[in-house]
Image (tube, helix red, strand yellow):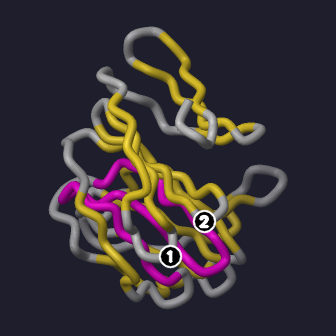
Amino acid sequence: TLFTSDGKTAGSVEVGEECEMAGGVALHSGQVFGGNRRGSVAAADIEEGSITWRHEKGQGELFTTPAVTDKRVVFYGTDGAVYCVERKSGKEVWTAKLEGRDPVSPIIADSTVIAGVDGTLFALKLKDGKQIWRIDIGDEVTEPAVVDGKLIVGVDDGHVSAYEEDGK
């Protein structure tokens, strides 16, 4: 549902049967992207009020929020894989299967995808999904953020950890 400045509904997009939006949504250039309880990711055109594409490989509820650039959308699937698709068409570019069961929303920093699952952070090349590095933290992590060239992540042990580009 879209809202005006006074809080009234300006329009909405029907996502589909059994497709209640389960996680956050991302917005880019008039398109909105989000996962749903059926396990798919949908892209909708805000102006047209219609679905532009769906990625339907998921099997269960998709609670993570996609990350978006001018050309790509990256998201965790319910099958434990990170998917990268073309933003405009939804055509799959690459898939990276990662270990773990409890993913957090990925982010894109320059040409790198940072993905977290259970107690591990992964850096993947945005171009092809190849793993650059992994950091085994041990406890579950929150959604990562990049601030002033540092990767920041909350950790279930009660700490906030920062990592620099060289992995320190």
Tell me which residue sits at (33%, 77%) in the image.
55
Image check: 39 left or right of 153? Answer: left
Image check: 53 left or right of 39? Answer: right
Tell me which residue sits at (62%, 42%) in the image.
165
Residue 43 place in picture, x, y as percent = 49, 76
Q: Which mark is residue 111?
A: 2
Quadrant of residue 15 in the image?
A: bottom left
**Which of these two is toward me, 49 or 25?**
25
Image check: 59 left or right of 81? Answer: left
Asked if 135 appears above or below 36 in the picture, the reply is above
Check disc 1 and report the residue beneath it: 127
Residue 79 place in picture, x, y as percent = 18, 59
Task: Please give the range of residues in magenta.
Answer: 62-86
The quarter of the rendered structure image containing the N terminus is bottom right
Asked if 50 appears above or below 13 in the picture, the reply is below
**Which of these two is toward me, 5 or 40?**
40
Query: Which badge, 1 or 2, is on the more N-terminal residue?
Result: 2
State the CA–CA distance, disc 1 to disc 2: 7 Å
Does the magenta-highlighted stretch encompass residue 165?
Answer: no
Tell me which residue sits at (19%, 42%) in the image.
101
Q: Residue furthest right?
A: 5
- Estimate how packed mark 2 is, as few (under 14), some (14 to 19) or many (20 or more) residues with alpha carbons within 10 Å: few
Badge 2 element: loop
The quarter of the rendered structure image containing the C terminus is top right
Asked if 62 appears above or below 118 in the picture, the reply is below
Instruction: Say what amino acid the circle numbered 1 marks.
Output: Lys
Tell me which residue sits at (40%, 29%) in the image.
141
